[in-house]
Amino acid sequence: MRGSTDIPRLLAAAFAGLCVTLFVVTPLDLRTQFALAGALIAAALIVARSQGRLATLVLVLLSVATTSRYLWWRLGTTLASDWSFDAVLSGMLLAAELYACAMLLLAYGQSIAGLRRRPVPLPQDVSRWPSVDVFIPTYNEPLEVVRATVLAAASLDWPRDRLRVWVLDDGRRPAFRDFAAEAGVGYLTRPDNAHAKAGNLNHALGKTRGEYVAVFDCDHVPVRSFLQITMGWLLRDPKLAIVQTPHHFYSPDPFSRNLGTAAHVPGESELFYGVIQPGIDTWNASFFCGSCAVLRRSALADVGGIAVETVTEDAHTALKMHRHGWRTAYLDVPQAAGLSTETLAAHVGQRIRWARGMAQIFRVDNPLLGRGLRLSQRLSYFAAMLHFFSGIPRLVFLLAPVAYLVFGWHIFNALPLAAVAYGLPHLIHSTACNARIHGRFRHSFWSEVYETCLASYTAIPTTLALIAPRTGRFNVTAKGGRVDAPYFDVRIALPYLLLAAVNLAALAAGGWKLRTGQGDLDSLAINAAWTLHNLIILGAAVGAACERPQVRAAQRVPARLPAMLRFSDGTTAAAETHDLGRDGAGITLRAPALLSRREQLWVSLFFFDEEQPLPAEVLEFGGRSVRVRFTALTLEQEAHLVRAIFSRADAWLGWSEGHRRDRPLLTLLQIARHGIAGVGRALALPLRPRPRTLPSGVPAPVRSQA
Amino acid sequence: MTPDVRNLLRHLRVPGLAYRDFGAAAPGSIRRTQQRQGLVTVGLVSLVAGVGRTALCANLVRAFALEGARAGAIDVDPEGTLTAMFGAEGRDPSTCIEHLALERDVLLVDTGSPPPSDVLSEADELLVVARPDAASLSAVAKMEELLVRTRMRSWRKPRARWLINAFDGRRRADREALAAMRRGLRPRVLATVVQEDRALQDAFLARRLVHDVAPGSQAVADLEALARELHWGRGSERHAWVD
């Protein structure tokens, strides 16, 4: 059966490959190439009118073919023949381009056929449900942040006798021990902090014996249905080691907040959890992300626990499991939510750690080598790691036009028009194709903004980690903090400012060249356009470094729950919450009521058939809307409030529905607008460097490990 | 199943995906269980006096009307408070039912305590009103015994459900009493719990309906939810007054 379908398929593939190869290698004169490019773009536009999967495949094929043709031309005709200084620069640009094209192709492979897993029902017989340990590792996060996670984890809907929640406190803080005792959950510490989070988890694995282990970072609060939604797959497939769910963030990431795009542009993490994880799940290569996942204890035991060799223990653990023949699953149902990093500096610090960790894995346990992996898994892991090496290529792209505009070096040995004829279709097809495949999760050009913000910071650590992989330090990502007043983080933005200055200088030099008649018009135009593009991206990066105040340390979450206000005179008002936070709530009354500021009242929230009135005071009111602040909650009341905010099974569904559709050109214009506004803000705001130095890439707080 | 889980399952659309919810099951509607077409009689009964039957009865008529059900109330309480304060359709069930069979969907029967045995055996539905306090709690067993006894003799086999009235969640005793009743009587405790509300008493003393006195109060929302739960069986979405 298999053979009979494979032969025609192979023949078709060979034929298609031959056609594409012919397309790629056929030399054409410039005019015909322009005609071909135009025809292909027109074809793509026609195909793109259809919404189906097949149309997407055709578009990807067109994009791959044009990119390959561009590369063929680039490698065949534009290389310098001698070993001059120009040639070295030209080689760097070529390497950066090869990197970008490789990433493009790998990303197509990752995202073209996303496996959209759905939950699997659990056995009817509850007595067959297995025992689960819930681990909440913490090191130096404030108790405020951890409380909600613990209380919500203790409310997970699972047979009580088979659920144990453990706070794994590497900080060994008495307040945490007391809180755990009060909340009725387990508390584990260890004498040393060896291997940071991985060591902490391994220590806890030795002290517990549930069949499964759920891990939540201490700021990731699970909804109550988490286990019932995720465990089905683990029970169905005995070789399944991990079920990972997305990390949903209910506070905007630094980019969205600082640029003001939270409402209509997808957040930074959405591409990974919305496209890449489902995409690599198809190839059985989805990986553990350190939190919001359930792991099988026997699989962990099989690979010697959580990996400790690198600072990204999560991905490395999954890689080891794959090598041992275990499977992993990614379930795209948001069943937990956490806080984004608070500032751009903290974000950069976190990504430096990831980048360094991935580079370490690349060195010490390279997925391309070693036993036990299929080719698709190797490529998936390779893509995930290669992604973090984008620093140097990004810097090359940001600086390349300077070579010609300022110094007059030709680092691209081709007729300018030929570069347009071959290069532009490659850019247009790939941009349009990406917008189609993951426009819902990442708008065009935003990747460049994100990469630009990181490039100058990850370039060195990744390179160092490649050379000396054992020198990693684990830094804890700071969360739950607050920015009190807006300021321009000039220290983090310094590289962006420098790059922008260089690009501006290049633009000025280009203008001068144009005036004095040096250089040819076509080259000047291409390089000027390139510089402008760089400036747009850099402007957005500068804007992202203008920290906006985080109004509340405890973020409010939109939630519509039936509620009641009970006043001191014994009367009541029927109401509905509008937003809920751990400090207070926004409430809509059913009918206008007479209130006074600072009036003490009780707020009841009705959900799950529980009721627990919360003491509160009125902050402000107008017509039917009231804002209240909760006052002096008991643990019982706090647990109730946490369940109201975080435990609802549907709390994080449909969160991204407000996002605008991605239209690449419009998106670029919008980035430009955000960039200009950002630069304006940067000029107007007070400068405030981070209190601690950043060159080591580690924002406060720091966790250093042997 | 609570609305959040229902939303999640609706979103996931996985056949066979069930959810274990250890909360109270939503009771069925009176429509589903009614034995005959037309008028449904609902007896409001309790062993303990002063639990708020009459005020509930008067206001429920309006709440049913707002739900689109034609409701009326009759008063078989020997004290005749309902008749005196609000007026009732009549005081004799059999003639009222005969008269009103085509004009009403729901007929509420306000009783005195102890409840008359003909209401206990002849109504379609019984609403046992209780406060979450010691007096009501200690009378639960006795009331249940009475219900079982009359049910054995009755051919109509009315379904009795418990309604908790004048609940104040700030009082631990109230929360514990409610939990105890839910545990012991589940699923026969209605999902709707009527909150203690000063407006309800004030309106009653002024011989007015709470809908007119305090339209934005929780009492109105609770009565609405109660009428909806009784009428349509949508118990757990009790307060969803915004669409």
Image: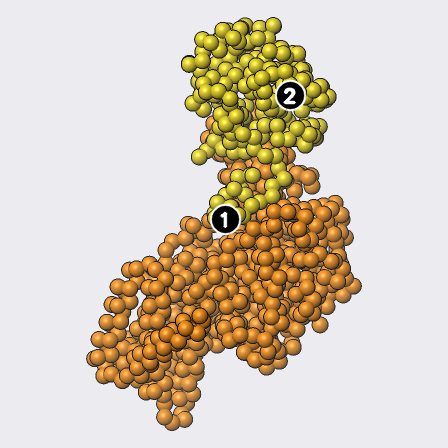
Chain colours: A orange, B yellow
Q: Mark 2, residues whose alpha carbon is within 10 Å: few (<14), some, or many (≥20)?
A: many
Q: Chain of mark 1?
A: B
Which residue is at a point 45% across and 62% down the rendered structure image? A114
Residue situated in front as seen by the camera: B162 or B101: B101
- Asked if residue A660 shows in the view, the reply is yes
Q: Position of residue A254 (x, y in %)?
A: 50, 58
Given the image, what chain letter belongs to the residue carrying mark 2? B
Q: Is residue A595 above or below residue B208?
A: below
Identified at 49% across, 8% down, the residue is: B96
Q: Which residue is mark 1?
A: B15
Say which of B176 and A180 sits in front: B176
Question: Callout 1: helix, strand or loop?
Answer: loop
Residue A507 appears at what percent x and percent y? 34, 74
The quarter of the image holding the N terminus of chain A is bottom left
Direction bottom: furthest residue: A82
Q: Position of residue A180 (x, y in %)?
A: 73, 49
Tell me if A452 is positioned left or right of A643 in this view: left
Q: Quadrant of residue A415?
A: bottom left
Label total for image: 2
Up/down of B16 relative to A562, above or below: below
Give amino acid for label 1: Pro
